Amino acid sequence: MPLVSDRGVPVGACLAVLALAVGVIQRGGYNSTTRVAVVLISLGALVAALLGRSRPAGTVLVALVVGWASLAGSALLSAAVAGDPGGALEIVGLLTVFAAGVAAASATPVPSRPLLADALLLVAVVVAATAWVGVVWRINPLAYPVGGLWRGASTLTYANAAAALLGMVFVLTVVRLAADPRVGRLAALGTYLAGVGIVTTLNRAGVIAVAAGLVVAVLATRPARVWPIVLRQGVAVGIASVGVLPILVDERPTRPVLSVLALLAGAAVAAGIDREWSRRTTAMVLALGGVLLVAGVVVVAPSLGDGADRLADARLSIGGDDRTGAWSAAVEEFEASPLVGQGPSTANFVWTDGGEAWRIKYVHNEYLELLATQGLLSALAGLVAAALLIRTSRGVDLGEGAWLRAAVLGALVTFFVHAGFDFLLHVPALALAAGLISGLALPDSATVSDVGAGRTSVTHEGAS
């Protein structure tokens, strides 16, 4: 008996979103207690996805099993060689969470996947709103000062992780706004809030990653449709940023009234434009928004004082001594054991800077960390797993959900570019979100059956 009809979102996807919400609200699921809860709920989502009427396609299941087994096996091998087999448990749990997200999303019937995208956007809005509130009212740990600048951290309590989640969802929904005529103003407003949240994090890698994801998404779909949405969202987010920039410097007083007014003005630009308006009318509204943005910058700039220089030095410069030192330490660890690495829990990232010794648990580069801790075998396993998943999506007709392919591609590029600058895959909520987004573009069993029957569009029994 099926767990849910194809008219709604299956239980597996609902449980996966619940696990994501639990993780997001509880510091990303990083703490041990919350991590266990996220893993257990994700396992429930995985079981429900496998038992529902709509299941992941057989090719997806094969890719997940082979990918999970190869990555988990290589992690266990590295840990065993290092003398600490239990050190691989964290990696195995994260792989399970990611696989559960992929299975739950790909088991969702294609006509229902926009609802799952809505759920992801809702979670992102919570993250963005708490980051913005944390900065505007200086509530720790929703925001925290670093180098004299307040950064939005949200309920994740880590600014870089918040930027990673918001970046994925922002790119995903921008493409959806451009390609799916059924999407309304609430989605445009949610996308705008996600963009505002990214700005409050002051995360350089997050901005770079979003730019990369948008470029890839535009190239993968119709540029003439996507660029206007990107422009509108950019102008709107810029207006909201004017209300936040003056209060980022710790010594400056907060100005919540200005921040709220700027947020509302940006929302009017982001969600106030109607699809039915002519290009001329839309261009006029965007031009007015641009004028408002420039005027706001002119008014606010004098109040920044030396804070502008501090902001530029801290957030607009490239790299940092701590990152380069950590990356050098990771390279040394890899060179000492290139095949299987130093072990997931026993790698020793230590370096000296100016006579001072530094030691960290995670390198701010997931790829260097993978090589250092698990070696070339795990890197090869990761490439095989990615190739298998990509292969399952090729040649599958998603019907009215065709926009998902470009949207998911852009969102994942955003995430994996960002992973080159921060430790993101070690946060359970981010691994689950990446899995859910990945599965949105993968076939379920009904989709594969339709393609095999020679149909040109996706249909589901009982679906509207």
Image (spheres, rainbow, N blue to C red):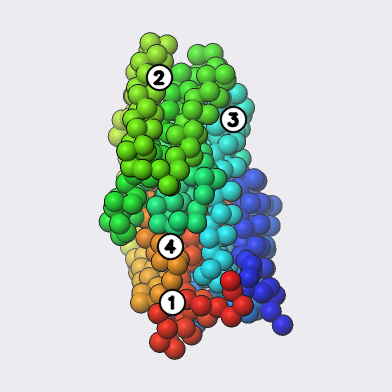
Residue 404 image label: 4
Choose mark 3 or mark 1, whichever is in front: 1
Q: Residue at x 42, y 47 (%)?
A: 276
Instruction: Assign a secondary structure to mark 3.
Output: helix
Sequence order check, earlier mark of 3 and 1? 3
Judge the density around disc 4: few (<14), some (14-19), many (≥20) Cα neighbours within 10 Å. many
Badge 1 is on which residue?
457
Residue 56 in view, yes or no: yes
Choose mark 4 or mark 3, whichever is in front: 4
Instruction: Assign a secondary structure to mark 4.
Output: helix
User: Which residue is at the far bottom?
Assistant: 453
Three-letter residue code for mark 4: Leu
Label 2 – label 4 distance at C-alpha: 36 Å
Q: Is residue 130 left or right of residue 67?
A: right
Sequence order check, earlier mark of 2 and 4? 2
Label 4 – label 3 distance at C-alpha: 31 Å
Q: Residue at x 44, y 57 (%)?
A: 180
Which of 195/271 is in front? 271
Q: Is residue 204 left or right of residue 131?
A: left
Which of 27/265 is in front? 265
Judge the density around disc 3: few (<14), some (14-19), many (≥20) Cα neighbours within 10 Å. many
Sequence order check, earlier mark of 2 and 3? 3
Sequence order check, earlier mark of 1 and 4? 4
Q: Position of residue 31 (x, y in %)?
A: 63, 48
Judge the density around disc 2: few (<14), some (14-19), many (≥20) Cα neighbours within 10 Å. some
Badge 3 is on which residue?
133
Instruction: Assign a secondary structure to mark 1.
Output: loop
Badge 2 is on which residue?
296
Three-letter residue code for mark 2: Gly
